[in-house]
Amino acid sequence: MKKQLFTSAALLLAISALPALADDMTKYQEESRKVAKEFIQQLGGELQKEMKANGPVAAIKVCRNVAPAIASEASRKNGWRVARVSLKTRNPLLGLPDAWEQKVLSDFEKRMENENPAGMEFAEVVTEPQGKFYRYMKAIPVQDACLKCHGTSETIPQNVKDALNSEYPHDKATGYTLGQIRGALTIKRPL
Ligand code: HEC
């Protein structure tokens, strides 16, 4: 009897916690989407401005300096890890995915068969040795503007190739075509 009472109390507790958890997940997702959108818009804006004003070689430094700066500001402001990762990195120091991110990126590739990468995202609560985290990823599709620096041999101008060769001799982030997934924005939020 005592045990039964305990079980139903535990069950009740579990049930009453469920909607809260669902609410939290919605809230976390909305907050992550907002940070991801701001990041992508801010970087896109700066990149476009520099490309127009001074061309793609000059714009390389926007990606080199501004992208990590926006990421670390977002991390500081929110207390989360905010970064861009890829299965084929240009800068392995910042862009290498961890095991969870690798799996999500591979899943994104599979989802491409019947899904538009523009709205592709994935979120999950995971327990790791360091604690519990809300993890979120949003796919970053290849657009026209990316091809000058991440495209094929035909779309990357020679002076950009030269600059990339000297600054990123281990660059893996070329050969992309329109609509593919270049990588993802990733958020890791301690709970
Ligand atoms: C002017 C050249 C240039 C253009 C245009 C450009 N990128 Fe990049 N991209 C770079 C450079 C340089 C890096 C490496 C930055 C660093 O050192 O952290 C990079 C890194 C990245 C990364 C981080 C992962 C990695 O490979 O290191 C992603 C994701 C990315 N770019 C996506 C895009 C997308 C999407 C577009 C188009 C909207 C784009 N880039 C346009 C030059 C460019």
Image: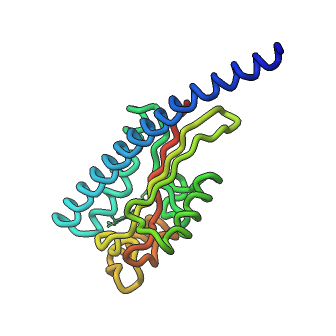
User: Could one spot residue 69 in this view of the protein?
Assistant: no
Q: In which quarter of the image is the C terminus?
A: top right
Q: In which quarter of the image is the N terminus?
A: top right
For ligand 1, give the image quadrant: bottom left
Q: Is residue 187 above or below residue 10?
A: below
- Residue 60 is left or right of residue 167, and the answer is left
Q: Which residue lies furthest to the top in this view?
A: 2
- Residue 176 is left or right of residue 17, and the answer is left
Q: Which residue lies furthest to the front in this view?
A: 1
Q: Where is residue 29 in the image (x, y as percent from the top left)?
A: 44, 42
- Residue 49 is left or right of residue 39, and the answer is left
Q: Residue furthest left?
A: 53
Q: Which residue is drawn at 37% across and 38% down?
A: 73
- Residue 46 is left or right of residue 115, and the answer is left
User: Could one spot residue 30 in this view of the protein?
Assistant: yes
Q: Is residue 121 above or below residue 77?
A: below
Q: Which coloring applies here?
A: rainbow
Q: Where is residue 127 in the image (x, y as percent from the top left)?
A: 66, 38
Q: Position of residue 51 (x, y in %)?
A: 23, 65
Q: Is residue 104 above or below residue 156?
A: above
Q: Which of 168 and 176 is in front in this view?
A: 176
